Image (cartoon, grey):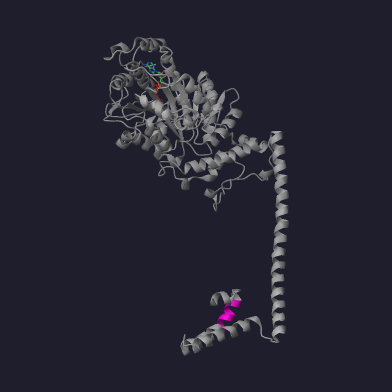
């Protein structure tokens, strides 16, 4: 591990509290990192900061230490339910991580209470915990914090409790200030006192001034810490010891390359990123089946409760694979990750930097590899320019085994695998269409047949993006995939029951349609019969043999004659009216439209 240091803690102009220094010694951190030595003195004074430093450079302590030092220097001590500091971060895992780092320090300061508010827990319990234990320091995700401001009826008037706020920190600030969290962040900011210190922290800091103003920073100090050993001019955003690679790979080669790569590194620890939750579910299962001796864990944003347990389990592993979505892209500090593999490039360039940054942290080595389709090669240049992220090529591995037939066999044997594959493919295509770099990631250029082979699909899914297209290069299996059973007996039984129900409904619908058709026909017939009878009755009553239509024409001519006699219409109009009336009777009757409606 390269020694990443910027002097001893004691060398800070503003001395740290002895118990803060004690906690740092306990953590085994004798020296500051560059971002810590640059940020802590400023943030401890009345300066708002917007700090940018590469992933894994110690930004968490760069705001945790100032928070403690500021609260320790308050004239008026905080009461239990007075909030002195709030840290907002985009994901539960990150909030848990920050809460843990903070606890290393607050355990030495019993006068400070801290509380963790994140989704996936009971909000009522969050309210009770705050009421009982207080929350001088809150670590929260945006959605849950916003929710807590709406629980006055439950006895938590958070709007009042934050009146004493001294410090607000937005961790992964650019992510918090982008569209996804806009509503929550804006609502939260409305409740917070303007007189406070505000700090934004990220490896890809927002450059938009309006974002800084929106977050409430007043003449902030921008801190941008350069990587050691990199030319001062370059603003490389990835750690200098990160070895960053790319591999150009066809869609139906990618999986075989991935498995070959992982099989040759089974004693190490890797993260494998996919673009969607469904892809994590499908490929996670596939990797489990094909890498028997390796511990494989999966995490994605749609998991409700297991996420934290799996995250903590993976952190402790000496070796293994975490298959994940971008919920694990930012901030996650997992010791000793050897490789970050991006099976799918991320939907935006800053996520690329953060994903790679899960390895090569705080001076350690580490490597990253992104798989790119031939048509995505321009992404390499884009990353070098847009994210100052240089990549070196890795050639395709030789003698890889074609494992796709095995995956197809798994899908034929178990409907659960078949359905996961179809869902993964559909989700991938839909996500692809939303790439930020749509000039490089163009859905219309995708070889869907090759992509479907790479997903080991048994047939092409029915989805709008594929409608009307032909796939001569895709060989579907020649069985009816509706007959593939679930391996799980209970699920299969439920499926059969559902199919039976649908069959019954279908036959009933057909019967009903016939009945309605007949009914409508018979109704129509009855109406005609009735009209015929009424016509015959009228003729009989009036001793007349004029049909309805002729009768209508006679009535209409009579009306015209009356108008002509009263001088309401000219002779020409009268004659024209007689003519039109005769023609119209023929026309409207053909259209089935009653001429009376037309006249009136
Ligand atoms: N002064 C220090 N000396 C040694 N290690 C440190 C020091 N400060 C932090 N670390 C360790 O460095 C690792 C990375 O720290 P941290 O997670 O805060 O980085 P980061 O800059 O926030 O990364 P990211 O951008 O990915 O969020 C952690 O394991 C942390 O314990």
Query: Which quarter holds ligand 1?
Result: top left
Residue 121 coordinates in the image, percent (x, y): 53, 27
Residue 522 coordinates in the image, percent (x, y): 72, 67
Look at the image and say whether residue 100 sits in the magenta stretch: no
- Specify the segment rendered in magenta: 582-589
Q: Is residue 151 visible?
A: no
Residue at 59 percent across and 84 percent down: it is 555
* Main SS of residues in magenta: helix
Quadrant of residue 394 in the image? Answer: top left
Residue 308 coordinates in the image, percent (x, y): 52, 25
Residue at 36 percent across and 22 percent down: it is 63
Residue nearer the viewer, 323 or 495: 495
Identify whether 298 is placed above or below 535.
above
Residue 209 coordinates in the image, percent (x, y): 30, 35
Q: Is residue 538 left or right of residue 349?
A: right
Identify whether 343 is placed above or below 538.
above
Residue at 70 percent across and 37 percent down: it is 492
């Amino acid at each position: 591990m390269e020694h990443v240091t910027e002097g001893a803690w004691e060398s800070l102009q503003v001395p740290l509290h002895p118990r803060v220094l004690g906690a740092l010694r306990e953590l085994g951190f004798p020296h500051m990192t560059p971002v810590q030595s640059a940020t802590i003195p400023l943030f401890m004074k009345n300066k708002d900061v917007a700090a940018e430093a590469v992933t894994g450079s110690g930004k968490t302590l760069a705001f945790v230490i100032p928070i403690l030092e500021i609260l320790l220097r308050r004239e008026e001590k905080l009461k239990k339910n007075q909030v002195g500091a709030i840290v907002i971060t985009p994901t539960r895992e990150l909030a848990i991580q920050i809460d843990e780092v903070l606890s290393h320090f607050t355990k030495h300061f019993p006068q400070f209470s801290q509380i963790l508010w994140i989704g996936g827990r009971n909000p009522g319990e969050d309210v009770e915990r705050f009421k009982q234990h207080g929350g001088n320091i809150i670590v929260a995700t945006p959605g849950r914090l916003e929710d807590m401001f709406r629980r006055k009826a439950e006895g938590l008037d958070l709007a009042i409790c934050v009146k004493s706020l001294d410090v607000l920190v937005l961790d992964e600030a650019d992510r918090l200030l982008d569209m996804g969290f806009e509503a929550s962040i804006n609502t939260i900011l409305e409740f917070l006192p303007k007189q406070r210190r505000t700090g934004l922290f990220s490896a890809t800091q927002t450059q938009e001034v309006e974002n800084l103003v929106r977050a409430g920073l007043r003449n902030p100090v921008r801190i941008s810490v350069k990587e050691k050993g990199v030319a001062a001019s370059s603003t490389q955003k990835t750690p200098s010891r990160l070895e960053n690679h790319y591999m150009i790979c066809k869609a139906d080669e990618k999986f075989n390359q991935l498995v070959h790569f992982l099989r040759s590194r089974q004693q190490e620890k890797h993260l494998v990123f996919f673009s969607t939750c469904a892809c994590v579910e499908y490929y996670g299962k596939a990797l489990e089946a094909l890498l028997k001796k390796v511990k494989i864990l999966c995490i994605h944003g749609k998991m409700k409760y297991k996420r934290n347990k799996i995250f903590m389990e993976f952190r402790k592993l000496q070796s293994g694979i975490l298959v994940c979505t971008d919920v694990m892209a930012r901030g996650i500090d997992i010791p000793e990750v050897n490789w970050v593999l991006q099976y799918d490039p991320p939907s935006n360039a800053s996520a690329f930097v953060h994903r790679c940054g899960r390895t090569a942290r705080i001076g350690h080595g580490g490597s990253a590899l992104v798989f790119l389709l031939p048509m995505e090669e321009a992404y390499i240049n884009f990353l070098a320019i847009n994210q100052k992220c240089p990549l070196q090529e890795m050639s395709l591995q030789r003698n890889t085994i074609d494992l796709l037939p095995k995956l197809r066999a798994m899908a034929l044997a178990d409907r659960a695998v078949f359905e996961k594959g179809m869902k993964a493919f559909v989700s991938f295509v839909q996500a692809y269409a939303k790439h930020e770099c749509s000039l490089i990631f163009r859905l219309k250029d995708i070889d869907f047949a090759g992509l479907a082979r790479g997903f080991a699909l048994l047939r092409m899914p029915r989805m709008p993006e594929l409608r009307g297209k032909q796939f001569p290069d895709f060989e579907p299996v020649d069985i009816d995939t509706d007959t593939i059973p679930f391996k799980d007996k209970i699920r299969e039984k439920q499926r059969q029951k559902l199919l039976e129900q649908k069959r019954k409904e279908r036959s009933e619908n057909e019967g009903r349609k016939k009945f309605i058709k007949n009914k409508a026909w018979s109704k129509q017939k009855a109406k005609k019969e009735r009209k015929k009878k009424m016509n015959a009755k009228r003729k009989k009553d009036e001793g007349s043999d004029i049909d309805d239509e002729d009768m209508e024409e006679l009535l209409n001519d009579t009306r015209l004659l009356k108008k002509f006699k009263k001088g309401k219409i000219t002779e020409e109009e009268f004659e024209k009216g007689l003519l039109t009336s005769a023609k119209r009777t023929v026309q409207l009757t053909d259209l089935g439209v009653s001429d009376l409606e037309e006249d009136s």
